[in-house]
Image (spheres, helix red, strand yellow):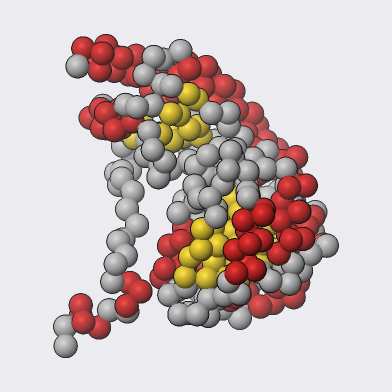
Amino acid sequence: MSVNQLIAQQVVELEPYESPDFDKGSTAVRLNANEYPQDCPMTVALSDMNRYPQAQSTLLKKAYADYAGLTPEQVLVCRGGDEAIEVLVRAFCTPGCDKILICPPTYAMYAISAQTANVGIARVPMIECAFDEAQIDAALSADASIKVLFLCNPNNPLTSTVTPQALESVVKTVAGRAIVVIDEAYIEFASALSCADFVNRYDNVAIVRTLSKAFALAGLRCGFVLADKRLISILRRVIAPYPTPVPVEVVAAQALSASGIAEMNKRVQIIEANRTYLMQALRNNPLIAEVYDSATNFILVKTRFAEEIFTALQTRDIYIRKPDIVDALRISVGTRQECEHLVAEMQELVRGLNND
């Protein structure tokens, strides 16, 4: 029997996750992955590398709990936000039986995690950048196999936000029927909308957080789940051992110190200033039909030239993202120099595409 005949059925149709690979020191303009655009070096002194780390880092649980205004018992440390999503699916969905519910357009990893776990996917599309509470309620009423609802706020790729009051209404509507996962990967860019305090009031809420965005540590792979301590104890049953290697613990603890948080807030201000510049400049580009308001470190633009712009920029060593939205492009906010370079190249494209 060949390897292809042994593959798990739910994996047959899947494709590997792919993103452009860049060599160390590459001069490419990387505006495709919503990373912080500049390196933030840290000096790290390591010890105890001969020992396995704690099953759950006491240091990081307390540091993140202090940051989020919670207790360490309400925090699970994960290998980035993606592992947080994966353990939530595995903990609450039975393979081949249960489903998650997503509200597209939304972050792709919710569906990917479900597919790899042989878990079904129900969909209730967003309406004018809002969650359709009535249809979510109807979907859960019609299908008791839906066990986890994923809500992304601020939204990737839409850049939009939903108020905590609207999210709390959804939580109340589905109470007793499903776990509500609120993905706050970009919450530092819209901190007033945080729903972290929900976990003190609702036992069916899980908040996903990450150090990859505003904390500028995408390469570290460190994320968190915030939830009622009983929900956290369930997730601990399925998370792979030792999610926090010693170097990750050391660097993440520095990032979550008072000085580290102050630096993060400065980075947010820099990104917001560059975002304002980029949005205003692209609104003046005739190839762009609309630039949507953003509460994230990226922007979404509407253009009938999406395919042409995407391809032309790649030939100029500028990388952006084509989301699963018709006539749209997602552009991460880079340094001011990178944003100016993108704007200049876009102006060049105006002449080229108009001549075509």
Residue 43 x/y as whole percent: 55, 47
Q: Which residue is found at the position 16% from the left and 88% from the top?
A: 1
Tell which residue pokes out farthest to the left in this image.
Answer: 2
Q: How many marks on residues?
A: 0
Residue 317 x/y as whole percent: 28, 31
Q: Is residue 69 visible?
A: yes
Q: Which residue is found at the position 23% from the left and 30% from the top?
A: 315
From the viewer's perspective, tell me whether residue 286 is left or right of residue 316: right
User: In which quadrant of the rendered view does residue 308 lie?
Assistant: top left
Q: Nearer the viewer, residue 270 or 206?
A: 206
Tell which residue pokes out farthest to the right in this image.
Answer: 201
Q: Is residue 31 visible?
A: no
Q: Which residue is found at the position 48% from the left and 17% from the top?
A: 283
Q: Which residue is found at the position 45% from the left and 19% from the top?
A: 282
Tell which residue pokes out farthest to the bottom in this image.
Answer: 1
Q: Quadrant of the C terminus?
A: top left
Compared to residue 343, the image places residue 148 above or below, namely below
Q: Nearer the viewer, residue 201 or 50?
A: 201
User: In which quadrant of the rendered view does residue 57 lie?
Assistant: bottom right
Residue 41 x/y as whole percent: 52, 42
Residue 86 x/y as whole percent: 51, 67
Compared to residue 159, the image places residue 63 above or below, namely below
Q: Nearer the viewer, residue 160 or 27?
A: 160
Compared to residue 225, the image places residue 335 above or below, namely above
From the viewer's perspective, tell me whether residue 212 is left or right of residue 322: right
